[in-house]
Image: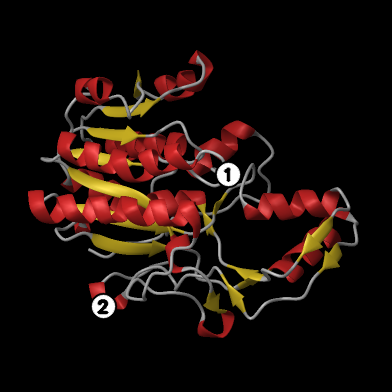
Amino acid sequence: MGIMMNESFSAPERVDTLPLLDELLSEPSPGVVETLRRLEGDVIVLGVGGKMGPSLAAMIKRASDVAGVERRVIGVSRFGSPAAEEPLRAQGIQTIRADLLDEKQLERLPDAPIVIYMAGMKFGSTGQEPLTWAMNTLLPAMVCRKYRHSRIAAFSTGNLYGLTPVRLGGSLETDELNAQGDYAMSCLGRERMFEHFSRTLGIPVSIIRLNYAVEMRYGVLADMARLVWEDAEIDVTMGNLNVIWQADANAMAVQSLLHASSPPLVLNVAGPELLSVRRLCERFGELMGKRPRFIGQESADALLRGTACSVTRGLAWSS
């Protein structure tokens, strides 16, 4: 079974309500339904409170229901307020408040044969370097010991490759890594911890190197649209990128569980199209009746990833 994109997805002409957007983001593809039909047991999502976590947990619940599989879907996060938990509970997802770095709280979490690991410090960690390393490198080791008998899909980042020449089309899973700075280096540490414990404890792991997941409320496309709308200067030095619709990124992550292995499967999850920042902003300008204000000149290098799955691993996109 290959990893497929959401081949049944049909985008509406307009998405003008948040409920419709959330419905689209959590719509499971046939590949996700089949994956969750074949796997047994509960699913626990660690770090469910982030940008992607709620839609991923909802997708798992919806796919399990379609597959006719009874399972608990459990979302774990610090949850800043009860309001953050209510949408998940309304969809039948159990929520647990926990500080994962607290060993006692981590140990009290329920066992589950399927783990989705989404916890970690993201961009903006300047000034919090010690916590960044603890979250991104120490915590994975703690989780591997806790869930040593589980199957784990662990989110990582494509930033580990560093910059790549635009003319080459993007880094592949087999390329040499070139992590720069505390954030990327700590994320490399995360991968090394999952790899170490996968090898020594025999844990099936898939590592998801995600690159620019987007939806209408956040992500690089939304950032560009805001800059155009606000008549702000747009630096095109990092002039090219590839993005992936958040629902497809979630679907790829779930489907990777069937291919989790020891040593880990490593999978790039990124959109296949090479996009131009300048052209995207010009299109936003046409839609808004604005003229984008550009500064800088496109660099020959960018943060780009190869088109999804490595052929050498027998995985392929399917539309």
146 in relation to 85, above or below: below
Left or right: residue 305 versus residue 36 is: right
In the rendered image, is residue 31 in sight? no
The image quadrant where one finds the N terminus is bottom left
170 in relation to 79, above or below: below
Q: Nearer the viewer, residue 101 or 1?
A: 101
* Label annotation for residue 66: none
- How many other residues sit within 10 Å of disc 1, few (<14), some (14-19) or many (≥20)? few
Q: Secondary structure at mark 2?
A: helix
State the residue at coordinates (77%, 64%).
235
Report, in whole angstroms, how far the alpha carbon at label 1 lies from the one at label 2.
35 Å
Left or right: residue 113 versus residue 56 is: left
In the rendered image, is residue 88 in sight? yes
State the residue at coordinates (85%, 62%).
286
Sequence-wise, the earlier of marks 1 and 2 is 1
* Label annotation for residue 124: 1
24 in relation to 70, above or below: below
The image position of residue 309, as x and y in percent, is: 35, 69
Which amino acid, by three-letter code, is at mark 2?
Thr
Q: Quadrant of residue 191?
A: bottom left
The image position of residue 183, as x and y in percent, is: 48, 51
State the residue at coordinates (61%, 50%).
219
* Residue found at the very far bottom of the displayed protein: 167
Left or right: residue 143 versus residue 13 is: left
Report the residue marked by disc 2: 312
The image position of residue 188, as x and y in percent, is: 36, 57
